[in-house]
Amino acid sequence: MLPVIAIVGGSIYLHQSGLNNRILSDPVLLCTWVVTVAFILLQLVLAWCQRPFTVNRRQRAELDQLRVTVVIPCYNEDAKILDRTIASLMRQTRLPDHIEVVDDGSTVDYTEIREWWLDNSPRGVRFSWVRQRNAGKKHAQAVTFTSDHDAHIFVTIDSDSALDRRAIEEGLKPFADPRVVSVAGLETAINIDKNLLTRAIGHRSLVFQLFAMSAQSVARGSVLINPGAFSLYWAPLIRKIVPAYLGETFFGTPVTLGDDTALTMFALLHGRAVHQPTAVSMPVYPETLTHHLRQWTRWMRASTIRMLWRIRYLPILSYGWFFTVYTICALFTSVAITLAIPLAWPATESLVFASLVALVVWPWAISLRLATVHRSDQSFLNKFIGVALLPVAALWYLIVLRQWRFYGIATCWRQSWVTREQVEVRLEDDPAEADEPPVYRWSHEHDIPSFGPDDYAELYG
């Protein structure tokens, strides 16, 4: 209800300031206002209606028969972080049948970690390791997609993403519906409390997922971005689209970025892409400003191409198509408003004040859904600090990332990663282990956060 109250309160303020009269008298402004408010309210209602997918005993037995293969493409990842990712898979309540690491020509020596897991994987889990010349993440994933002919479900996971112990079990549940061909997990930074940057960006990402992505999932399975950190796909579909996946071009340039959005796009064209908020992954978020901006550049270059594909290929007037068009219009409208404010001053004085208030009130209002995320290693104080920083994250997007996005749009044909030329983030060593041999402690100690109560029905009613 608080987001609705924020919208009503803002409308009353604009009416009293006289700005509403100008909006009502201008057909273009009126149409923009009505569409924006209506779509925001629609997302609120849809997101509020989301419930995690559940299964009965018969459906659980059917899901247990599915063969699950996890592919971990790896390029210049910190060895201990990669080890933690593998360890999180080995302790799942529903173990995968096959885990394959594809080393895409890294300069890091993974000999110890490879040998350890080849010798110590749990019974019933086949662990394999492939190394290839550097060809990009898509080609690394395709190694497993094309060689594992028995899998019913392919799980894609980043090399820095530890999983909650029930992630695969929860992620499989939506496949009880035969219309579902892909499932997006809930992504939250494992290092979310590292510094101000990880707190602001990490909580902003969570709010987006529990607002926009939740709404997309409820709207007939229209999720547009399956997180690369953890997503699940119907394997027969993936095998079918591998040639198009690897052969994608944009004005003759091979597209190597945006593997997650490309797979989601193919899923949307063949069935439903849904979100399962109880299937949690914990990737490592950038801890430095330069890493964050380089990652954002890569994302914006990929998203530019994906938006064009969605407009071209998704059914017109589907929720995904409308969301894409709305996002593009909102971007350019916000830029136009920013430019108009100084040119029309002082008539826009009330609009400036309303915008500043909205930057604070709106992120806080929709952040209330974060209360549904129960994380074992995060105190109430740390969560409160993260939520308090959301207006800062909104301002950071408005001032910096929005402009950076246009740079990504203008250079979208540059498909190099711009990150991972070297190890970006390292897992800090425990001082107590300084005198011990360089053994990967994550292989032995599964000190990984867990999420939610034992019974998720208790959380969601």
Image (spheres, helix red, strand yellow):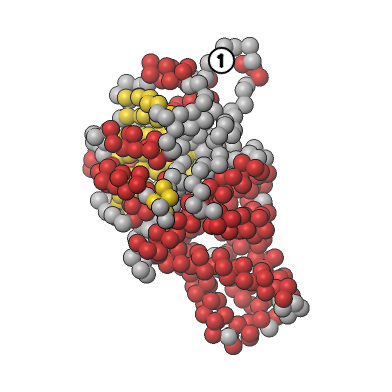
Q: Position of residue 447 (x, y in %)?
A: 53, 27
Residue assigned mark 1: 438
Residue type beneath disc 1: Pro
Q: Is residue 458 visible?
A: no
Q: Is residue 309 above or below residue 384?
A: below
Residue at position x 70%, y 65% from top? 356
Q: Residue furthest bottom?
A: 25
Q: Quadrant of residue 317?
A: bottom left
Figure quadrant of the N terminus: bottom right
Give how far across and how far down residue 442 sits, in percent.
Answer: 51, 23
Q: Is residue 133 visible?
A: yes
The image shows residue 249 at horizontal and vertical percentages of 39, 51
Badge 1 crowding class, 10 Å Cα cut-off, few under 14, some 14 to 19, many 20 or more, is few
Q: Residue at x 42, y 67 (%)?
A: 322
Name which residue lies at 54% across and 85% down. 27
Give the residue drawn at x 26%, y 46%.
240
In the rendered view, tell whether residue 170 sits above or below residue 411: above
